[in-house]
Amino acid sequence: MGDIRQIGRFKILRALGAGGQGMVYLAEDSQLERLVAIKTLRARMAVDFGALQHEARIVSKLQHPNIVTLYDAGEYQGAPYLVSAYIEGSPLSELLQAGALPLVRAAGIAAALLEGLEYAHAHGVLHLDINPDNIMLAQSGQPMIMDFGIARMADEQPADGNAGLTVSPQYMSPEMRAGRGLDARADLFAVGMVLGEMATGKPVGNAEAVRKRLAAPGGEIDEKLRAIILKSIAELPDERYPDAATMRQAIRDYLGAVHDAALKENESHSTLDFLLRRMRSKGDFPALSGIISEINKIVASESESANKLARVIVQDFALTNKLLRLVNAATYGQFGGNINTISKAVVILGFETVRNIAMSLILLEFMHNKAQAQQLKDEVITAFFAGMVAAQLAEGNAMQDGEEALICGMFQNLGRLLAKFYFFEESQEVARLVEQRITEDVAAIKVLGVSYNELGLGVARSWNFPKRLLLGMEKLSSGKVRKPRTDTDHIAVIVNLANELCHAAAVTGKQEKGKELAKLCQRYGEALAVSEQRLNKVLENGLDELAARAAKLQFNVAKSPLLQKIRDWSGYGLKLQAVKPDSGEVAEGISRIEAAVSAENGVAPTSEALLSAGIQDVTNALVEEFGLNDILMMVLETMYRALGFKRVLILIRDARTGTMAARAGMGGGVEAVIPRFRFSLNGHGDVFQLAVDKGADIVIENVNAQNIADRIPAWYRQAVDAKSFLLLPVMIKGKAVGVFYADMAEADALHISERELGLLRTLRNQAILAIRNKA
């Protein structure tokens, strides 16, 4: 039709969009002074204009809140058009571009569509082109069906079948495709297809594709809604709902059940919300939880770098040192050599393994609460041991599977641990009910309104645990466990077996051991290759691994009544040794950091020891397949941790702009500083220019000192709030290609010995060597 400005009495204001059947315009009805929507139908659709006007007169009488009212039909330049009410909003197809809708909203939209169709069908009108483009969502959220103007009367069945219909093929019922007679069930088929698309977030393709998608394991759609969709898109009309009212009632029943379930869950949500608020407000909650949450976000994002993960971890001194202790344990010995920086650990072990190790350490923080240490210590050890047993059961799989089993095995106990930490009296009441032979889940729900497992899962979700780990933490229902279908199912089976085995060893007598092991073999025999001998062996191996990790992390398990009972129950003769302070001697295969750290007496590692360890990491990385960025991050991390800088940065020469600009760094708020930290290479007289022009290492102890204040450029004072800093230029062939920068918040806080400065220069020189080799 070209550029349309007027159609009859309607003034075209602008185009609203294009569909498969034609253009849609916003227009002004000059006669009735109202806005309307005009849809022009392409002439090639071969629409019988006389029939169109006849049907339009009938459809225009449909007045329903879920139907966009048709006002008129006409012909312009040989092509028909339809005039309908203008609804401010957007088509459902636009909303679906963002993915699946919440199931309750998807079901609500479908119910509203069916209400409109029920009304239309009662007036003898079939729509026959229900699809997301023809469903308008008004600004109020009200779903409305558009384009009834090309509908068909229910009592009209043309001799040529359905040849005259031009509809969206993906939503077309089988009888419509075959040219057979049509009735209201064709519209119900299309609604079912749209509901399937809303629920899955995927284009429908065809009915068979929807059926396969709904049948896939691990889906988000619950069984009741899945059954409704599958019945509505059945191949044969007689197998579908007989009419719109019946299908709408099925959806309303589903929504009612969801509402009832939500009411029942309200109490559990209240408990979880109260717990999360208390955890955020109480100072005694382990600070590591915030770091764990951020770590999970980084690992879940495909756009985040290994450098950012390392940067987040090294901000916590305790986490860094504990993680390095575990990384250098025998478990990871296959990687060879020592790992002395988180940056290197991330590159070698990968995002997820480092994340898993970090998360395993958070539970140990509960033991540091002095007021409840005795009450919590055995719970922490129980959780830790369950993780060790789960890892033993996963032996033979990939290392990541073993680590995930360990994490899920530990954190399946998170809810019980948190309850004892924050709801001690309530947890005691749960224990009393359990003694009366009430299951722990039922007792916890009775007292707290939520099971321990659901409480732990709720907190884990708030910590951004990935879905894979959340599924692995869920408790299995009672009865025989079926063979797992997916890797995630497999981890969940292992985790539940590990925790049930540990529980049996902890609460039953040795004389009941054979019966308990036989029960577990019966329950899990189909799912896993287990025997009484193997279960006893994983207990023994778990005790060995727990002792090794406890020694590495220097926390005592020797006096644990729980482990003593499990040892006796299993018949294992292991003697759990008390941890002694470091003797100062370095055992073979232990990181150099171990020589300087004593977690038991709180002595921090010396700066020289940390610098030497970092230098060793970089030296090893130089002869291995490490990228330049990875090596530079090892240098930055070593500087940051060794001397306690507020932040460290690496600046790189940008020849295009003639500037030296920050590219990466570590420390609090460093991401906000990096974009502002740059200076021109054509400046004069300031300390930054001196460093790059002369290749001079510069230590500024007080930026406001009388003899130096005028040499500190204005851009620097605006970019950072540091009062002292260090500059180490990176020179190649007499030219500065970069600068290492490190600062302290306070004046006169930067005290670097000659030995420390020499080690820092060695680090800088290693960076120069890396740049030369990787260029």
Image: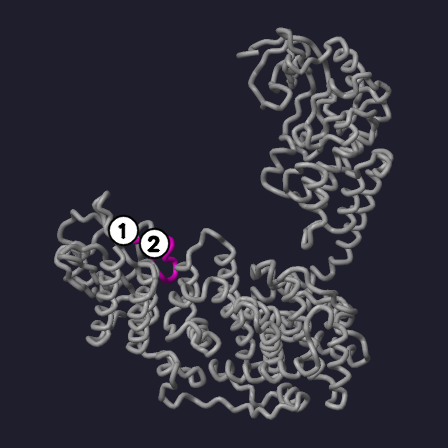
- Quadrant of the rendering where the C terminus is positioned: bottom left
Query: In the picture shown, does residue 33 fall above or below 487?
Result: above
Give the magenta range.
661-672
For numbered disc 1, what is the local secondary structure?
strand
Work out whether residue 436 can be spotted. yes
Based on the picture, tell me whether residue 666 belongs to the magenta stretch: yes
Q: Position of residue 394 (x, y in %)?
A: 60, 72
Image quarter for residue 425?
A: bottom right
Q: Position of residue 432 (x, y in %)?
A: 77, 80
Q: Which one is nearer the viewer's eye here, 216 or 592?
A: 216
Based on the picture, tell me whether residue 674 belongs to the magenta stretch: no
Residue 392 lies left or right of residue 678; in this view the side is right
Give the residue displayed 39% in from the left and 59% down from the top: 307
Q: Position of residue 51 (x, y in %)?
A: 77, 11
Give the residue displayed 65% in from the left and 86% down from the top: 566
Going by the numbered disc 1, the residue's amino acid type is Ala
Residue pointed to by mark 2: 673
* Number of disc labels: 2
Query: In the picture shown, does residue 292 fall above or below 755?
Result: above
Residue 642 lies left or right of residue 556; in this view the side is left
Q: Closer to us: mark 1 or mark 2?
A: 1
Image mark for residue 363? none
Residue 158 lies left or right of residue 43; in this view the side is right
Query: In the picture shown, does residue 596 fall above or below 614?
Result: below
Going by the numbered disc 2, the residue's amino acid type is Val
Q: CB of mark 1 within 8 Å of CB of mark 2?
A: no
Q: Residues within 10 Å of mark 2 (few under 14, many from 20)?
A: some
Residue pointed to by mark 1: 661
Q: Residues within 10 Å of mark 1 (few under 14, many from 20)?
A: many
